[in-house]
Amino acid sequence: MAAHRKSKQSPLGGSAVRTAATLALASAATATLFEGSGHADPRPTTAQVKAKVDRLYEEAEVATERYNGAKEKADEARKAFDRLRDEAARRTARLNAARDGLGAMAAAQYRSGGLDPAVQLVLTSDPDQYLERAALAEKAGDRQAAAVTAVRRELAAIRQLRGESAGTLTALREHEAELRRQKASVTGRLAEARTLLARLTEEERARYEAAVAERDGSGAPASARTGDPVGTGTADGSTTTRADRSSGGRGPVTAPNARAAEAISFARAQLGKPYVWGATGPSAYDCSGLTQAAWRAAGISLPRTTYTQINAGQRVSRSQLAPGDLVFFYSGISHVGLYIGGGQMIHAPRPGAPVRIAPIDEMPFAGATRVG
């Protein structure tokens, strides 16, 4: 019986079993490791990171200009709505005054008893006096008819104003919704660029900054120029980016006219100020905000966005460029600078890069416009 209860022995000893189990686990771990390595995404090179960050900056600038356009339209719709609302208030006040006048006339008629004029003539003891009063009453009737006409006119005008106000309010809400969409697009792309750059090692960051400095022609690493290669500014003008004014090229420029000279002088005074998307100065700018402010200082009003500024004057070819011309870049006309001669421009490049002088060859040229 004891022999039947005895457990069957393994052909291998306990030590051999443990060894086999260890080898099996090691083999499984090694297989898992190689399998995982085969599916892991390779770490992007510094050049790949730079290319993606540049693309994100370009997309953010496109969204910034759309934001600027939506904001301009929203501001116009808000002003139009306020004008309509004020006009409706004035019309309502006139309507109430006309109604009060009609009420006073009706009360006077009630007090007089509203007798037929022929009966009043028969009953009066002084026919001449009655006829004089009748003439006055006729004039009062004319005034009453005019008051009724005025009430009807004000009512019609108020109805029309209410219809226009409703349409304007709908447009305003649509522009505000577009504002929110474009703001989300800008901030999302900038956040993605910031995340990519944060993953770089110190050595990779140094290579990235050297590549940016070489492209920009600034001769200094991005960290030395701006502190944060992405920047944390917002459209209210606040920023944590340091900016200096060591952009060079401060020699005199021969402008074709006094206004162009004034625009260039203003732009030079902004060198070193940070790029902040949606900003129009005086402490920070985006690209079209800078050119708009420069020409405003020269007495010329430009529209807000790159794709409207390019149509704000006479188109000129690249070979005809003169100081003061607006130069545009990328196929979507998403960037603009102020040409200062010698193949150079003053522009607000991107987040993390301050207003600076740069060659117009650093971006794909799309066209130029002369506004002054």
Image: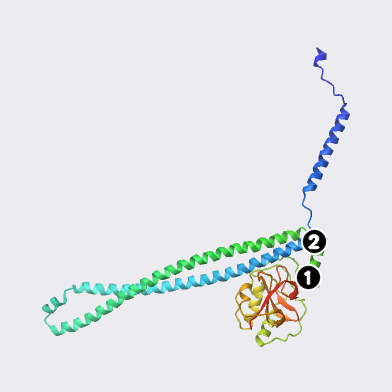
Residue 297 vs residue 123: left or right?
right
Residue sitting nearer the eye, 124 or 212: 212
For mark 2, does the 10 Å Cα neighbourhood hold few (<14), some (14 to 19), or many (20 or more) residues? many
For mark 1, does the 10 Å Cα neighbourhood hold few (<14), some (14 to 19), or many (20 or more) residues? some
Indicate the position of residue 276 as horizontal and vertical percent values. Answer: 67, 69
Residue at x 59%, y 63% (from the top left corner): 180
Q: Is residue 92 in view?
A: no
Quarter of the rendering containing residue 321 = bottom right
Residue 270 vs residue 92: left or right?
right
The amino acid type, in three-letter code, at marker 1 is: Arg
Q: Is residue 193 in view?
A: yes
The amino acid type, in three-letter code, at marker 2 is: Thr
Tell me: residue 91, above or below residue 15.
below
Residue at x 77%, y 60% (from the top left corner): 48
Q: Secondary structure at mark 2?
A: helix
Tell me: residue 256, above or below residue 76.
below
Residue at x 64%, y 78% (from the top left corner): 293
Residue sitting nearer the eye, 5 or 319: 319
Residue at x 86%, y 32% (from the top left corner): 20
- Disc 1 designates what residue? 215
Mark with earlier residue (1, 2)? 2
- Disc 2 designates what residue? 46
Q: Secondary structure at mark 1?
A: helix
Quarter of the rendering containing residue 59 = bottom right
Residue sitting nearer the eye, 352 or 343: 343
